[in-house]
Amino acid sequence: MRFYINAKFSISQSIMDALHDDEKGNFGVVFTFDEPGEREDVLKWVNLELSEENQKMLGSMFQGQYLFKDIYGRTSKISIECLFEEWMGAFETLNKSEVVYAEKMYL
């Protein structure tokens, strides 16, 4: 019965980290965000056609939208919205200081 509560989490900013054949069978559900240089790989990963329409769909997703593939191989676009304005503070991960502004000058 232990296999019913078993889970593997792999978190990365690149789909390329998950494309190894030895890893592919270990994922039950997949959350993928748009990465312009990896759109074809993202579409392959979630079993969507490599069409221009699907690539445009990926490119038009806004922050908080992602593609979700479930354990049955079904893929959908999901949007996460903040329900309460008070919760927005939890998403602020950076206090802007002089160091932040200096770093932005070199990016």
Image: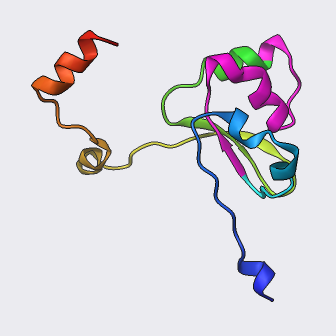
Magenta highlight on residue 50: yes
Residue at position x 62%, y 37% from top? 66
Q: Is residue 3 left or right of residue 77?
A: right
The answer to whether residue 48 is above or below residue 79 is above
Q: Position of residue 68 (x, y in %)?
A: 70, 44
Front in this rendered view, residue 107 or 55: 107
Residue at position x 72%, y 22% from top? 39
Front in this rendered view, residue 59 or 82: 59
Q: Quadrant of the C terminus?
A: top left
Q: Examine the image and state in which quarter residue 19 appears.
A: top right
Q: Is residue 23 left or right of residue 14?
A: right
Front in this rendered view, residue 11 or 49: 11
Check the image and name the residue furthest to the left: 98
The answer to whether residue 39 is above or below residue 27 is above
Q: Position of residue 93 (x, y in %)?
A: 28, 42
Q: Examine the image and state in which quarter residue 106 appears.
A: top left
Q: Quadrant of the N terminus?
A: bottom right
Q: Is residue 43 left or right of residue 103?
A: right
Q: Position of residue 102 (x, y in %)?
A: 18, 17
Residue at position x 10%, y 24% from top? 98
The answer to whether residue 59 is above or below residue 34 is above
Which span of residues is magenta-colored? 30-53
Check the image and name the residue furthest to the bottom: 1
Specify how the rendered protein is coloured.
Answer: rainbow
Mark count: 0
Residue at position x 80%, y 38% from top? 46
Magenta highlight on residue 33: yes
